[in-house]
Structure formats: C-alpha cells, structure tokens
Amino acid sequence: MDISSIPKVFWYSLSISLLSLTTGLTVSSIFATSVSVEVANSKINLSKNINSVQRINQDLKNKVEELEEIDKAYKQLQQKYNRLLKSTKPSVTQELKELNREIQKFQSRVRKIENEDLKEKILQNEEKLEAINEQISVN
C-alpha cells in the first residue's frame, strides 16, 4: 500500500481528531467522580473512592503505629517513675518531680483511644476496598 498518495489534509485531520478525542477523555475523567471504560467486552469502573479508601486506611495504620509508640514511651516513663518512687533518697526527689511532669504531659496530650477500635476500622476499610475491587472485576 502506497501511503504517499494520501493527501496531507487527511493526516492533519486525523491528528486533530485524535488529539481532540484524547483531550475530551482526559477532561471528562478529571471532572468525573467515576469513569467507566469498556475494553474487550469487559467494563472497568475506575472510581475516586478506591483512592480515598486506601488513603484513609493508610492514615489509620499510621495512627495505630503512632499510638503504639506513645503507649510504649508512656509505659517506660511509668516504670522509671515507679523505680524512683521506691528509692527514698533526697536526690531522687527532683527526678521524680520531672518524671511526674512528663507523665502528666502524656496524659494531657493523649486521648484514650483503643488500638483495637482503630484496627477494626482498618479491617472495615480493607473489606470495603476488597468489595470495590470485586465490583471492578465483576463488571
């Protein structure tokens, strides 16, 4: 097949139409809350909800790690405080007061949030994510 006989206008119009199609699809996918693409008779739903569930899940995991670190530090402070409390030397009194202040700072800063509650939320979000993935694979 000789493509040199095809006029340049055809190639220009083909390029412009492909460019406009790509631009249109890009703009519609940016502004849509969910995009549906059909390829080879299988429909794929791409949703912003998947990303938000993954982000929330990651935030919850970070919070659990942060709370575990705070809990560990709090327990260490309490152990130090109890050890110093058993010692009755006058030089220890100042250290006791400082440790007591640090413990009070922890108590005022940290709300009592159970790690189990956060872990349950993580599991719920993972189940939602799996349901969304199953919905994508079914469609």
Image: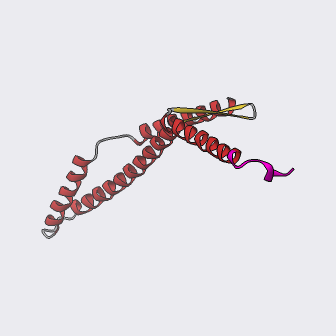
Residue 70 shown in magenta: no
The picture quadrant where one finds residue 113 is top left
Rendered location of residue 20, percent (x, y) = 58, 41
Q: Residue furthest bottom?
A: 91
State left or right for residue 84 relative to residue 32.
Answer: left
Residue at x-position 51% and y-position 37%: 48
Residue 115, percent from left and from top: 41, 42
Viewer-proximal residue among 52 and 20: 20
What colour scheme governs how the chains and residues are painted in the rendered image of this protein? secondary structure
Quadrant of the image occupied by residue 94: bottom left
In reply to whether residue 4 is colored magenta, the answer given is: yes
Q: Nearer the viewer, residue 57 or 2?
A: 2
Residue 122 relative to residue 12: left or right: left
Q: Residue at x 31, y 54 (%)?
A: 74
Q: Position of residue 44 (x, y in %)?
A: 65, 34
Left or right: 56 in relation to 133: left
| Residue at (47, 39) in percent of width and height | 52
Q: Residue at x 23, y 63 (%)?
A: 84
Image quarter of the C terminus: top right
Frontmost residue, 135 versus 25? 25
**Residues shaded magenta:** 1-9
Number of labelled discs? 0
Outermost residue toward the right in this view: 1
